[in-house]
Amino acid sequence: MDPTGWLWALFTVGAAASQTARNALQRSLTERLGTLGATHVRFLYGLPFGLLFLAVVTLIFGLDGIEPSWSWLAWTVFGAVSQITATALMLAAMRDRAFIVAIAYVKTEPVLIAGFGFLFLGEILSGRALSAIGIATAGVLLMSLPARSGAASTGSPAAAAGGSMAGQLRPTLLGIGSGAVFALSAVGFRGAILDVGDAPFYVRSTFTLASGLAIQTALLTGWLLARDRKVLREILQAWRPSLIAGLAGAVASQMWFLAFSLQTAAAVRTLGLVEILFAQAASRKLFAQRTSNRETAGIVLMVAGLVLLVSS
């Protein structure tokens, strides 16, 4: 059996688990650092680990076959900027909505990735894969419907403040907008990985990851130096929790990129919906937030879609 036929799934599940840890850590930093500051933690403290991964890969395998080009740079910058924007939107949604529900909003991205992947990369999915994406995303949408009786089941600050339609619409738009931009980011990074030469997939993935983190760190550091140095100082002072978040983020990104090098972005991100299960566990343990029966039904539907996808 070709190991690449199942390796992408292992990388994706590992990425989802690491990403849940990173999101929880970033969420806890948002109150202290603000949305942009907590966003920058992911990149600033993830860069050293990304460079370490690249150094190890270079030492063991070398960089033969890596051929950076202007098109590769364009894909990488596109993915990097999209990921910055999507992360900021996601953290803003988490401030207004329960952790697991905010993640559910973000995870509407697979359907969009399927469209973007076809539009930008010419990737065509099978009917079974498209059905799996639809079923899994329907489960996510079921989880995302506003609760009738306020935020009792989700711990939503917005609903707790009055449960107004406007209060619930804002995190919904932020979360779904984040998912859309994450979809663009995934397509951009997959395009970069495919366009950087004919080196082994793990070399292309690691090289693109380190490059993307360097671009993101430079952009956000430059912005904060010019516009808000106080936040940058706060980020540096909060180095202990930020370093752990950076490590979790770098590990997650490394695994996402390895998965992208072996499988379409749509399939990877759909299986990545397993993050909802990890987020539910984190939501209960870290934030004392309960899951409603409707949200549980959505999770069951989502898992059914994931099983169909992996078995296709």
Image (cartoon, helix red, strand yellow):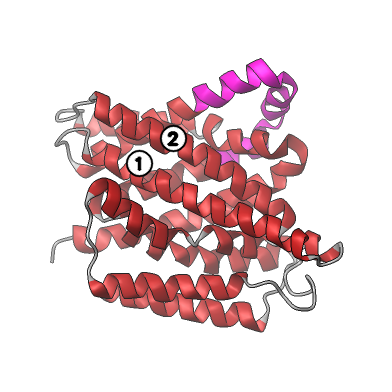
- Residue 112, located in which quarter of the rendered image? bottom left
The percent coordinates of residue 184 (x first, y second) are 41, 46
Left or right: 242 with respect to 17? right
Q: Distance between the residues labelled 1 and 2?
A: 8 Å
Answer above or below: position of 234 versus 118: above
The percent coordinates of residue 75 (x first, y second) are 32, 34
Location of mark 2 (residue)? 80
Helix, strand or loop for disc 2: helix
Location of mark 1 (residue)? 188
Q: Can residue 52 be seen in this view?
A: no
- Residue 30, located in which quarter of the rendered image? top right
Identified at 62% across, 64% down, the residue is: 100
Answer above or below: position of 216 versus 270: above
The percent coordinates of residue 138 (x first, y second) are 48, 74
Identified at 66% across, 39% down, the residue is: 241
Query: Answer yes or no: do the residues labelled 1 and 2 have beta carbons within 8 Å?
Result: yes
Helix, strand or loop for disc 1: helix
Q: Which residue lies furthest to the top in this view?
A: 226
Which quadrant: the C terminus?
bottom left
